[in-house]
Image (cartoon, grey):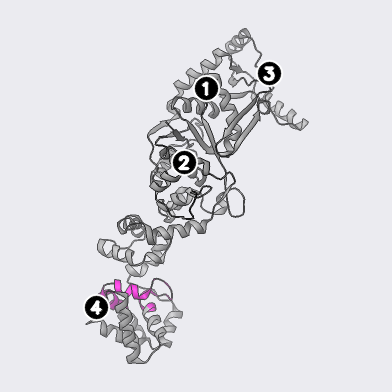
Amino acid sequence: MVKTRFAPSPTGYLHLGNARTAIFSYLFARHHGGGFVLRIEDTDRERSKREYEEMLLRDLEWLGIEWDEFYRQSERFDIYREYVNKLLESGHAYPCFCTPEELDREREEAQRRGVAYRYSGKCRHLSPEEVEKLKREGKSFTIRFRVPDGRNIIFEDLVKGHISINADDFGDFVIVRSDGSPTYNFVVVVDDALMGITHVVRGEDHIPNTPKQILIYEALGFEVPKFAHLPVILGEDRSKLSKRHGAVSVMNYREEGYLPEALFNYLCLLGWSPPGTEREIFSKEEFIKLFDLKDVNSAPAVFNREKLRWMNGVYIREVVSLERLYESALPFLKRAGYDVSDEEYVKRVLERTRDAYDTFSEMVEKLRPFFVDDVKIPPELWSRLEDMRSYEVLSAFLEKLKDRDIDTPEEVKKLAKEIQKELGVKPKEIWHSLRIALTGQLEGVGIDVLLSTLPKERIAYRIRRVLERIS
């Protein structure tokens, strides 16, 4: 059975690149009817924070990624010690007593010679008696993995293809720090093997780690999984996606008012596309049915913020149900201080204004006229009202409103045509007068939509306030 995992470190917010990795790993497992594991890699005691872990879990749940098993590496140290001892007993690992100062001198010497640094192997030849003597003296030590000289480590990557790296390029590496905590390259192998991970899906920045991990798999007698290294995501300037390109964390987009379905959809199409179709909007179930790692592009994907914004707008306008729209928009409306006690009214507003905004943060301002009656009209628009025949237009509208129902935009337009004919004014004078009086702006949601949605008494209240000022 196929089994994949997503293994984030809780040292910051969930980056869009890591979110895509989680999605691809999840989709591949589900496509093959397999299992998906979430494992928190928190062995870095200084940088790992529980609040980051909580945010990671919240972001993944928000995106709709469900996991079958959950682990924290910090709760598995006894397991790691058992496998460190196995490597020590088999001679695949050894204690290293080199001090940080000695290692720094080695690095400086390599730099002086203009060659890449690799550990000299000074401690790999210590006898058991020498090791015991140094331990009795209380010397601090790490544990290093003994890398075979001259070995070419070869693997077929499911995205990148044939990869070969010579072990001499990196030399003996640390698997346990001097404080006793295990390092990433060691614990990831133990965890993936014991958890039955068949396919490791991760970013291409992990390619240099892969040969080290393959050596540990072999030394412990574990089966080596298949690897799929995903290309990086670039900003539109073709540099690696970072904060200077704008929001780069899932949390940012959640707070800006993006739908998780839209962000999930967009990230799926960053570096992958379903064969045989140019469609861009899919449900999660469709992605599960279609996704395969063989269709992932090995070249970097370019993140286009405007494309994501467009896609979110499509979801708001055409995809999600009114109930889902209401559920998603409500927290933003509440945070803005709007009165949302009338659920039926709020849903009517949302249904009629779907095409007016692409995100919920944008929605808050666009929908202000539907919730705030004390409209602030800037001086230049007061002047415009006074320059037009606004008093006549607004008075006529108010009078006709008493005996008319304008529950649809069509009824509003019909009423406006009557006033235009009776007063002999231009359409622009009617619509501008009404828009300024009701919103204090010249742009926004269609005034016919606003007038057909607002209760009549609230329309009358706003118009009277303006008539009192321009009379």
Residue found at the very far left of the displayed protein: 403
**Is residue 448 in the magenta section?**
yes
Q: In this view, does 346 lie to the left or right of 141?
A: left
Residue at horizontal 44%, vertical 27%?
196
Answer whether residue 342 is visible to the viewer in this image.
no
- The foreground one among 126 and 201 is 201
Q: Is residue 196 above or below residue 467?
A: above
Label 3, label 4: how far apart the Cα atoms are = 91 Å
Mark 3 or 4, nearer chain start: 3
- Residue under circle 2? 22
User: What amino acid is at disc 4?
Assistant: Asp
- Residue under circle 1? 180
Q: In which quarter of the image is residue 428?
A: bottom left
Label 2, label 3: how far apart the Cα atoms are = 40 Å
Residue at horizontal 59%, vertical 39%?
160
Answer whether residue 143 is visible to the viewer in this image.
yes
